Amino acid sequence: MPSRAHIGADQFVEVGWLPVFMRVNQIKMVHMFKILHDLAPHYLSTEIIQVNRVHGHHTRASNMGVHMPRLTGAGQKSFIYTASQVWNSLPDIVKNATSVHVFKKKLKGYFISVLKDNESSNFL
């Protein structure tokens, strides 16, 4: 590979890695999974509220969705806001994993499939 070549999706898939922004989201999602399943310290779960605790309406998001906090400015860069946003965008098959190990495997598979769908993008 030439020294100034751009790294695309196929190179990441080939080595089994994720681009940095996806790896950051992967770490956030593992934390969210642990928070929602009471596997994280209690102080982390005080700000994360599931949708079904906010209202009694049965919606697609009510099972495993997380209530999006109303934040502006710098608050939109916080863990609570960004992790809630990414969590709500995950498919239910990933969110409904039975253990942390299974969740990590499904999550990485989902991110790799998103990466393959965006093959035309250069990441580095």
Image: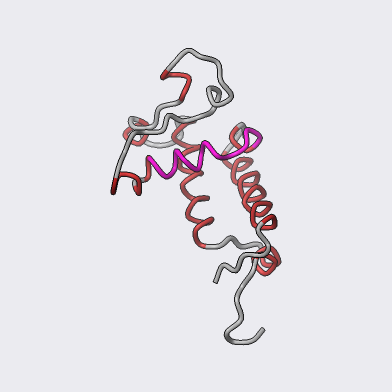
Task: Spot the residue most to the bottom.
Answer: 3
* Residue 87 on the magenta span: yes
- On screen, 87 above or below 16? above
Front position in the image: 48 or 119? 119
Q: In this view, does 74 lie to the left or right of 33?
A: left
Q: Quadrant of residue 35?
A: top left
Prevailing secondary structure of the magenta residues: helix
Q: In this view, does 51 lie to the left or right of 122?
A: left
- In this rendering, is residue 67 above or below 75? above
Q: Which residue is pictured at 41% across the width and 33% down the height?
A: 68
The x, y position of residue 17, in whole percent, is: 61, 62
At horizontal 46% and vertical 42% (from top left) the residue drawn is 31
The image position of residue 22, as x and y in percent, is 53, 55
Q: What stretch is highlighted in magenta?
A: 81-93
- Towards the viewer: 87 or 122: 122
Residue 28 lies in magenta, yes or no? no
Which residue of the protein is positioned furthest toward the top in this rendering? Answer: 56
Task: Please name the residue shown 53% across and 22% down the image.
Answer: 62
How are the residues colored? Answer: secondary structure
- In the visual, does 29 lie left or right of 40? right
Q: Position of residue 44 (x, y in %)?
A: 35, 36
Q: Where is residue 124 in the image (x, y as percent from the top left)?
A: 54, 72
**How many numbered circles are shown?**
0
